[in-house]
Image (spheres, rainbow, N blue to C red):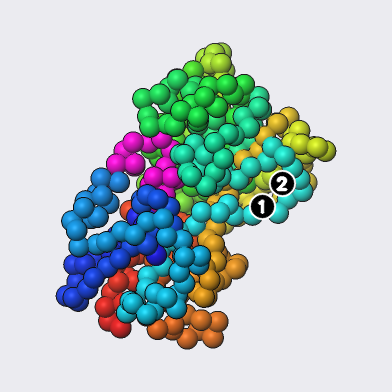
Amino acid sequence: VGAGPAGIYAADILSKTDVEVSIDLFERLPAPFGLVRYGVAPDHPRIKAIIVALHKVLARGDVRLLANVDYGVDLKLDDLRQFYDAVIFSTGSIRDAALAIEGIDLPGSFGAADFVSWYDGHPDVPREWPLEAREVAVLGAGNVALDVARILAKHADDLLPTEIPDNVYAGLKASPVTDVHVFARRGPAQAKFSPLELRELGHVPDVDVIVYPEDFEFDEGSMAAINSSNQTKQVVKTLTDWTLKDPSQFTASRRLHLHFLKAPVAVLGREKVEGLRTERTVLNGDGTVSGTGEFQDWPVQAVYRAVGYFGSPLPEVPFDELKGVIPNREGRVIDIDGEQVPGVYATGWIKRGPVGLIGHTKSDASETVRHLVED
């Protein structure tokens, strides 16, 4: 159930086992490929090219795709049990994780997942998006925050060589934005950007990337992270190189600001977003941070929270409301008493939460399929 990368990888791996098996993939949307189709920014064709490999699996003819079938509405687990020996749920995480700060529900405050769905032409999302802000805040320190900030700051004409939908181009073209601010609670060494995505920011035409030397602190935890991870080392190097830029070089018409050690504490405004209040944080030595009681207000007219995706509950299937996943042991679904639910499995983000890159879903599917075959 779910024909994104997780579901297709699981179908592919299962079809290559010694078990004689027929596989049907059920998909709620009219078209497959999930997050690769509707979650990857249009100016990332290299990642979108994963669709080619997924398409090859479906094109072989030994896996059947049944699209436009909504689990929980068109059919439920009892229906599937009548016709299938096993059911794997691979429904992903499409909701925005909540951020419990004052003013987060004001008009002009958005979830990044919804914005990503809009610029990727997801059928569930309205065709229009209110792009009226000159100054925008993006909350988060992962690749989704970078994607959102880059798409907001980039000139629409530079997206024309991509598969950007016409309505999205028109919306971005009319946007009055001049400054996009990305806020991270922790320091540069704790950022979850991938090195390639970060370096890419420095090559966006007519957009200056601005960082602030006073935001650069490295405690023992930071140094340990830098020394133990080549990825962290590259991210910190790219960010540190940007601190050496001469401010007189900043001549672009748009600016993308990266702020570290700034925790969002409130979205300001009465009728709509008028600003963001952050608290300066300090590193504790182990990679965590504490507040300092020093606050700063930023004049922004829109806020996007990119603090993670969250899973959605499915009828007749156990669900962990705190983690946003189907409770499981290595892919075997378990009930509230910790007992295995016979013949029901999970894989992908609905199994382990929204962490890791698309490729990590493959080893995840292998684990689930291995247990299914054992059972």
Q: Is residue 371 visible?
A: no
Would residue 300 appear left or right of 215 to someone viewing this image?
right
Residue tagged 2: 104
- Secondary structure of the residue carrying tag 2 is loop
Residue range (magenta): 34-50
Is 70 or 60 nearer to us in this picture?
70
Q: Please, is residue 81 above or below residue 266 in the view? A: below
Q: Please, is residue 324 above or below residue 218 in the view? A: below
- Secondary structure of the residue carrying tag 1 is loop
Answer whether residue 76 is magenta in the image.
no
Question: Do labels 2 and 1 touch, CB within 8 Å?
Answer: yes
Mark 2 neighbour density, 10 Å: few (under 14) some (14–19) many (20 or more)? many
Q: Quick one: label 2 or label 1, which is nearer the N terminus? A: 1
Is 135 or 222 nearer to us in this picture?
135
Q: Quadrant of the N terminus?
A: bottom left
At which x and y percent is residue 101? 73, 50
Q: Residue 321 falls in which quadrant of the image?
A: bottom right
Furthest-right residue in view? 270
